[in-house]
Amino acid sequence: MTAKIVNKWLENRPESFHEWLNGRRIDEVECVVADIAGVARGKSMPARKFARQERLFLPISIFYQTITGAYAELEDVENQWTEPDMLLTPDLSTATAAPWTGDVTLQVIHDITNLEGEPITIAPRNVLKRVLDFYQEKGWQPVVAPELEFYLTKPNINPDNPIEPQVGRTGRKVVGRQAYSISAVDEYGPVIDDIYDFSEAQGFEIDTIIQEGGAGQIEINLQHGDPVALADQVFYFKRCIREAALRHNCFATFMAKPIQDEPGSAMHIHQSIVDTRTGENIFSHPDGSTTNLFYGFIAGQQIYLPQVFSMLAPYVNSYRRFVPGEAAPINLEWGEDNRTTGIRIPIAAPQSRRIENRIVGMDCNPYLALAASLASGLLGMNHGLTPRPEMTGEALESAITLPRSLMAALDLFEHDSEITELLGSEFCRLHRAIKRSESDEFLQVISSWERDHLLLNV
């Protein structure tokens, strides 16, 4: 990395970035990667040092950590705790502002390799790139558009206390069941304004912002595009939204089910595939009719998503979404314009025909969720699979077929060699170890429900 390369990059940034910079000198650069949970890890340094930095290292053990900060023990890995270094190389296409900081700061996502330049296979961003390579071999390019749901809540200082919705501008605690209400969004006007301002400075385009069904629950829709670029945006947006909320004395949480009796938060993923030679959507024939590949992708989602469910619902809390009577799907039926199904086909023109995966939780790592969902669809197309008949009624009245717990999901993930081939065996082994460790940690905690109902009754 040289100052000349950095300066050339600066010249090509969008106008919104230069408006934020406003002639100021960049003071600091945050060199970041996403760990298994999607948490930003890395190093910060003065911009001058970044411009002349030749090599940057992080220990591979950052990928061994659970969400609690504990470390998972890996079977059949020699010298796990020698913690060899990984080489980090800046991907300047990801460089963007950190507009909430006191200093003028850039964030840059880094590519991760070993010292010989080979990709570290357990890095989530590399897992997604690996899946996309399989698409590239077919001459296909996936296009995705995530929808981000989250809650704005009162600051929760004591984890023993329930999470509560934030008080809005009216001075009243907001209530749920106000989906699409403009007034409900206005309750959090200052937070939303900061999210817009931060996004503009970062060069990200928000499609829409709406009020979701929960008390203080917001949804942000992103523009469609390349899966790695969109996963990068989700990774950045989580931090951006949290920082905007903190400016106004509230928390932004991406937990799948943060508040009892309120809907959970999902990250719906719209997915389509284009032919890299023609640029045409492979889900549609020239006459506008659906192709066999479209149905194969749906069938792949139905058959293989349960086997990667621990990547889409990665924590014990994630499974609180999938209960009858809530807004989340409970099975993998599919249907056109049917929001009760786990796989929805939105109304769209043939060139925009797409498949919406509605089961992914907002607590996911976006790189891994996209990798798992796209891998499932690819297997369905490769095998020429046929989906079950379309659901024309309410899928929520059908049987629950999704895994009901993290351990049940891991049991399904453990035994599928086709998914392992696409995602990488080393990553799959690590994922199982981390999730089993987290599940074991959770079982050591006694909940208030257990104290309330078992203490004097059993």
Image: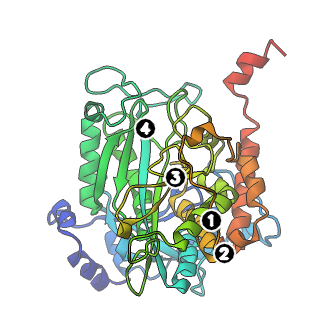
Which residue in the structure is indicated by mark 2? 383
Give the residue furthest to the right. Answer: 458
1 or 335: nearer the viewer:
335
Disc 1 versus disc 3: nearer the observer:
3
Which of disc 3 and disc 2 is earlier in sequence?
3
* Local crowd size for mark 3, using a 10 Å CA cut-off: few (<14), some (14–19), many (≥20): many
- 315 vs 184, left or right, is right
**Considering only vertical position in the picture, is 220 above or below 396?**
below
**Considering only vertical position in the picture, is 413 above or below 327?**
below
Disc 1 is placed on an element classified as helix
Which residue in the structure is indicated by mark 1? 300
Disc 4 is placed on an element classified as strand
- 20 vs 249, left or right, is left
Q: Which mark is residue 68?
A: none
Inter-mark Cα distance, 1 to 3: 15 Å
Q: Which mark is residue 151?
A: 4
Tell me the amino acid under the disc marked 4.
Answer: Tyr
Give the residue furthest to the top. Answer: 456
